[in-house]
Image (tube, grey):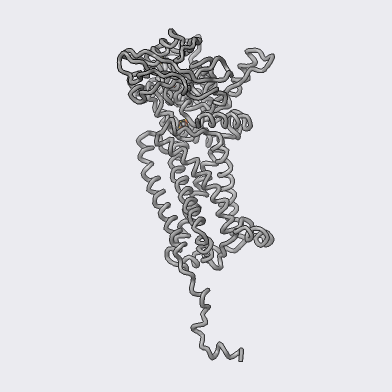
């Protein structure tokens, strides 16, 4: 954070009791940012404890109160959420240093680990839109680059598709649970942030085209590799496997993975990402040899 | 906060190296060659090198014998072999490796998992081993065998200390200072870790062990291999430090020659 104005606001008043017992208050520090490319800054809020809170209800309280710990009136903290049951991934943020979904981050547990305070910051690998909201369009661009779909567009009735083995189905089901939350990318030491600034006089389209080009050249990450694995094992998807493998070994492809295996540890959907990475690595090896000898 | 530094560093690197890989379109093939070269010839040579050095455990005479066997190939053959199969691959692997290190971040503080620790160590040991090898080749070999270089530069800066005719010179060069002994211990251990863990990650990269169970299982042979090689390396280092000077140099056979014959030409 080159532009963090000050680290944790140590001098500011803290909640008097923060042991998380009912009826007590606790501290929440939020890394805020007023807009894309703006400097970020820490802000402390005091939240009244209630039973069974999660980080989304904490943020709702902060928004309703819109006052810092020292009583300053501020704009409500912005964040994203949707399903509230860990299936959409919209509320992903870094809580106490670890990336996860805010809707399933329970306050009781967090206060058990650290009774002092709860620390919320936006994901570091994506450009911040505002406060805890980030722009994850790079993930969508990655899926487009990898052709992460099954091509069945047709006006003709092509009859029933090929059958899948039970084993294949089970594997595909696990992989298809990915909700594009980005946890695996946030924790990956090989996945680096890309943030572009809009040039003067550049139209929205030009800006996005420039961004897309950069996204296409940067690391696809564990989520992208698992998507290739998923669609290349699907009996219909397999028909376009070569195109996906080409994208898999292109610039920013699987080769960037350094096998730190953080991705599989942080994935909330428990997707066997490192298995996919190894399987895709094997496919990439075979693909490379084929391309060499079939020239 | 360390996180602050990392992000600045990243931004700086992205600004000079571009947003993705420094190898552009050839990224995949370059990294796969980098991976392969780490095993053959570099890894294979490391095993050979530590195994031949281990001859010092059997004594200086055995060690000299081993050196003689290798150097019987003759200077030209050795020159070609060492550049083709040792120096160039190491320079390639090391330089590409440094770029790879620069293109990743260290985040063990927030994600302290075993895999992440091994990943981070792989980068550290790679960097340490590379710097160590650059110096080690200079220290023992001198890099360039030209006379002007050896007498003008290498010898003057403590390089070119190994003389194959007198293999004991390696032991002398190492025990010259405790600092050199420590540097060698660190260098050997870093290289061995980097190879053993590198073989494990290679198995994933190339798709040899794919399931979590297979990856778990593969750790056992890699760990065993690393420990054995590490012991071998440190054992040889210890033997280098403890080696007795060869008898021939101290008393060049004069004891066996009858004084009368020895004295006759002078009188
Ligand atoms: S693979 Fe897991 S961590 Fe990664 S985006 Fe999908 S659900 Fe999230
Ligand atoms: S295994 Fe690869 S993709 Fe997963 S966290 Fe490590 S480097 Fe990233
Ligand atoms: S709101 Fe959907 S995952 Fe949290």
Residue A208, relative to residue B201: is it above or below?
A: above
Residue in the picture at 40% in, 45% down: B222
Residue in the picture at 35% in, 22% down: A111
Q: Position of residue A104 (x, y in %)?
A: 37, 17
Q: Is residue B161 left or right of residue B235?
A: right
Residue B103, relative to residue B169: is it above or below?
A: above
Q: Quadrant of residue A145?
A: top right
Q: Position of residue A185 (x, y in %)?
A: 48, 26
- The C terminus of chain A is located in which quarter? top right
Work out whether residue A245 can be spotted: yes
Q: Quadrant of residue A274?
A: top left
Residue sitting nearer the eye, B49 or B150: B150
Work out whether residue A180 can be spotted: no
Q: Is residue B96 left or right of residue B58?
A: right
Residue sitting nearer the eye, A232 or B202: B202
Q: Position of residue A166 (x, y in %)?
A: 34, 23
Residue B43, relative to residue B238: is it above or below?
A: above
- The N terminus of chain A is located in which quarter? top right
Q: Position of residue B89 (x, y in %)?
A: 57, 48
User: How many labels sit on residues?
Assistant: 0
Residue sitting nearer the eye, B80 or A116: A116
Residue in the picture at 38% in, 33% down: B211
Residue A46, relative to residue B224: is it above or below?
A: above
Q: Quadrant of residue A270?
A: top left
């Amino acid at each position: 954070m080159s532009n963090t104005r000050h680290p944790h606001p140590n001098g500011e008043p803290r909640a008097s009791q923060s042991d998380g017992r009912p009826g007590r208050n606790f501290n929440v520090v939020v890394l805020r940012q007023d807009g894309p490319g703006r400097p970020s800054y820490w802000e402390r809020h005091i939240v009244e404890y209630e039973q069974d809170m999660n980080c989304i209800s904490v943020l709702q309280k902060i928004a309703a109160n819109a006052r810092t710990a020292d009583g300053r009136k501020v704009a409500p903290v912005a964040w994203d959420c949707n399903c509230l049951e860990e299936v959409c991934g919209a509320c992903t943020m870094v809580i106490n240093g670890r990336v996860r979904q805010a809707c399933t981050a329970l306050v009781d547990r967090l206060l058990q680990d650290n009774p002092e305070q709860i620390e919320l910051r936006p994901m570091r690998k994506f450009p911040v839109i505002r406060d805890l909201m980030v722009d994850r369009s790079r993930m969508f661009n990655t899926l487009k680059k990898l052709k992460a779909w099954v091509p069945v567009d047709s006006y003709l009735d092509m009859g029933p598709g090929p059958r899948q083995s039970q084993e294949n189905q089970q594997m595909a089901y696990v992989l298809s649970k990915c909700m594009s939350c980005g946890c695996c990318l946030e924790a990956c030491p090989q996945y680096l942030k890309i943030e572009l600034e809009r040039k003067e006089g550049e139209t929205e389209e030009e800006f996005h085209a420039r961004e897309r080009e950069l996204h296409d050249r940067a690391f696809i990450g564990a989520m992208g590799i698992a998507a290739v694995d998923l669609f290349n094992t699907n009996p219909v998807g397999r028909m376009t496997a070569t195109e996906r493998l080409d994208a898999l070994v292109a610039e920013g492809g699987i080769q960037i993975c350094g096998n730190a295996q953080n991705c599989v540890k942080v994935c909330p959907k428990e997707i066997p990402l490192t298995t996919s990475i190894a399987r895709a690595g094997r496919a990439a090896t075979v693909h490379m040899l084929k391309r060499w000898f079939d020239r | 906060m360390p996180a602050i530094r990392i992000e600045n560093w990243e931004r700086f690197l992205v600004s000079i190296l571009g947003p993705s890989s420094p190898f552009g379109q050839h990224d995949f093939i370059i990294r796969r060659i980098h991976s392969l070269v780490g095993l053959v010839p570099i890894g294979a040579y490391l095993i050979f090198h530590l195994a031949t050095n281990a001859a010092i455990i059997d004594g200086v005479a055995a060690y000299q014998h081993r050196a003689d066997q290798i150097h019987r190939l003759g200077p030209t053959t050795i020159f070609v072999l060492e550049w083709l199969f040792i120096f160039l691959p190491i320079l390639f692997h090391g330089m590409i490796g440094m770029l790879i290190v620069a293109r990743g971040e260290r985040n063990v503080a927030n994600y302290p998992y075993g895999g992440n620790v091994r990943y981070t160590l792989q980068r550290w040991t790679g960097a340490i081993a590379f710097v160590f090898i650059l110096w080690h080749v200079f220290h023992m070999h001198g890099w360039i065998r030209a006379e002007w270089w050896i007498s003008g530069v290498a010898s003057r800066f403590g390089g070119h200390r190994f003389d194959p005719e007198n293999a004991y010179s390696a032991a002398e060069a190492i025990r010259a200072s405790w600092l050199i002994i420590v540097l060698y211990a660190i260098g050997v251990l870093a290289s061995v870790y980097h190879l053993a863990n590198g073989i494990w990650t290679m198995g994933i990269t190339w798709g040899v062990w794919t399931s979590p169970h297979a990856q778990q299982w593969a750790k056992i042979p890699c760990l065993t291999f690393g420990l054995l090689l590490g012991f071998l390396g440190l054992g040889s280092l210890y033997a280098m430090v403890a080696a007795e000077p060869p008898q021939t140099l101290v008393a060049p056979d004069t004891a066996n020659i009858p004084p009368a014959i020895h004295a006759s030409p002078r009188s």
